[in-house]
Amino acid sequence: MLGGLVVVSDAACWVAVTGAPSDVVVDGRAREFAAPVRLGVGSTLRLGMPLRWLRSYVAVAGGLDVQPVLGSRSTDTLGRLGPSPVQVGDLLPVGPATGSPAAVDTPRPPDASALRVVAGPRADRVDGDVVDLLGRTAYVVSPSSDRVGMRLLGDPLPMRTDDELPSEGMVLGAVQVPPDGLPVVLLADHPTTGGYPVVAVVDERDLWQCAQLRPGEHVAFARHP
């Protein structure tokens, strides 16, 4: 997040950096972003701070060969499942590569736009057309946002009732409304169930923006066509 990563290779390998565009420096020399980069034995890879977006990704040929938990090698920060979060000084084992990178066209970065939403199962709890209200309200990303959810700051949604709900299943991209009326978009580490009303759902094609928006940046919603 926001650059600053430094990794050292103890074996020759191919890597590629994607996500938030940042300077890629290997052993003091600038290398290409979103392209295969060869690391030699003992090479040091450094990432600069991206000019836009939030999260950069380093892919390694062969993948990270950590023990999977429930079929996943990522860390669930809410449920505390999976491998331990990466710490300074950790040694990350790499699996066997399948060959040199093939020449392919690098996908172009997607364009940021308004988050497309549809009304959710509890849209009737909002006093008015929830999609219209979301589209007309100025929101910014809260500093308390994380992998669990993108929390928003702005005018609270007008709710018809604050009666509690029994816990219901939650999906990726669900827009929950806690008692303060400020929407939360559930992201990768969201809970499997929750009691706050889901008044809308973000289209899965726009969820990448929720992971890349920085605290303080403007968030716009639009009705799914």
Image (cartoon, rainbow, N blue to C red):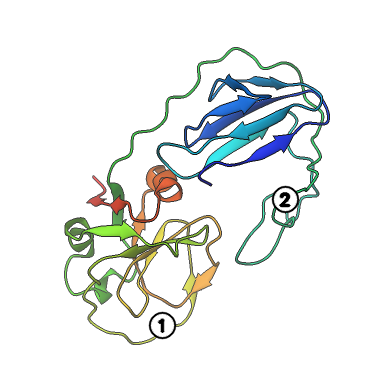
211 sits left or right of 139 in the view = right
Q: How many numbered badges does the structure rendering display?
A: 2
Q: Do callouts 2 and 1 mark residues in contact (Cβ within 8 Å)?
A: no
Q: Give me the residue at 23% from left, 73% from top.
A: 126
Q: Nearer the viewer, residue 126 or 31?
A: 31
Query: Given the image, on which type of amino acid does mark 1 rest?
Result: Leu
How far apart are the two marked residues, 2 and 1, measured between alpha carbons?
42 Å
Using the image, determine if residue 29 lies above or below residue 19. above
Where is residue 176 shown, x and y percent of the image? 38, 68
Q: Which residue is mark 2?
A: 88
216 sits left or right of 191 in the view = left
Q: Quadrant of residue 145?
A: bottom left
Where is residue 151 shown, x and y percent of the image? 39, 63
Specify the farthest residue to the top: 103
Quarter of the image with the C terminus in it: top left
Where is residue 40 shown, x and y percent of the image? 77, 21
192 sits left or right of 87 in the view = left
Q: Which residue is mark 1?
A: 165
**Counting residues from the N terminus, which is met first, the one under dot 2 or under dot 1?**
2
Q: Give me the residue at 18% from left, 75% from top.
A: 127
Q: Give me the residue at 27% from left, 76% from top.
A: 125
Mark 1: few/some/many CA within 10 Å (<14, 14-19, 20+): few
Where is residue 79 shown, x and y percent of the image? 64, 67
* Secondary structure of the residue carrying numbered label 1: loop
Using the image, determine if residue 26 lies above or below residue 146. above
- Tag nearer the camera, 2 or 1: 2
